[in-house]
Amino acid sequence: MSIFRRESSPSPLAASEPSGPSQKRRVTHVAPGTRLRGEVVGETELLIEGEIEGEIRVEATVTVGAEGAVAGPITAPVVRVAGRVVGGVTATDRVEVAPTGSVEGDIAAPRIVISEGAFFKGRVEMKSDRAREARRPRGAGEPESNLVETGKP
């Protein structure tokens, strides 16, 4: 019996993404009833329907299924939560919390969707260049070239 299973077909929890015959998705699946402790790192998508206790750092989409649970921080480009996460969630693209999802921890991402009915306890930080530019006061960080010193007291 294997703890991890790699699938080349899309999972029912993943959003539909275009995939042609030349593009195969690789998914690491933590099956229901499986409990893992430790650090999870990798480059393939991660579908969690069991339990993970520890840090998750993945270079692809992380999906916590409706029966899935994570105790620890998650870092990935896209994080989808339909189950339970206790820990911070950081994404470089977006975080989505489904109506059945529960997040207890801070969320940081450029785009964040928390569906009606979802549970969330923590802080939200929307991190993007556009957001930083909009918050920056005019003239901040720009050289003050319009000031002229004459040398007179």
Image (cartoon, rainbow, N blue to C red):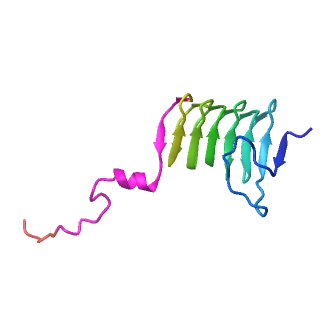
Q: Quadrant location of residue 65?
A: top right
Q: Residue furthest toward the right? A: 1
* Residue at image location 67% in from the left, 44% down from the top: 62
Q: Is residue 126 left or right of residue 138?
A: right
> Which is more toward the observer, 72 or 77?
77
Across and down, in percent, residue 81 comes to 63, 37
Q: Where does the C terminus fall, quadrant-wise?
A: bottom left
Q: Is residue 142 magenta?
A: yes
> Which is more toward the observer, 119 or 11?
11
Across and down, in percent, residue 91 comes to 58, 47
Q: How many marks?
A: 0
> Which is more toward the observer, 124 or 18?
18
Q: Is residue 18 magenta?
A: no
Residue 58 position (above or below residue 35): below
Q: Where does the N terminus fall, quadrant-wise?
A: top right
Q: Is residue 26 left or right of residue 148?
A: right
Looking at the rendering, the stretch of residues picked out in magenta corresponds to: 119-147
Q: Is residue 34 left or right of residue 145?
A: right
Across and down, in percent, residue 122 comes to 51, 32
Residue 57 position (above or below residue 100): below
Residue 143 position (above or below residue 7): below
Residue 52 position (above or below residue 136): above
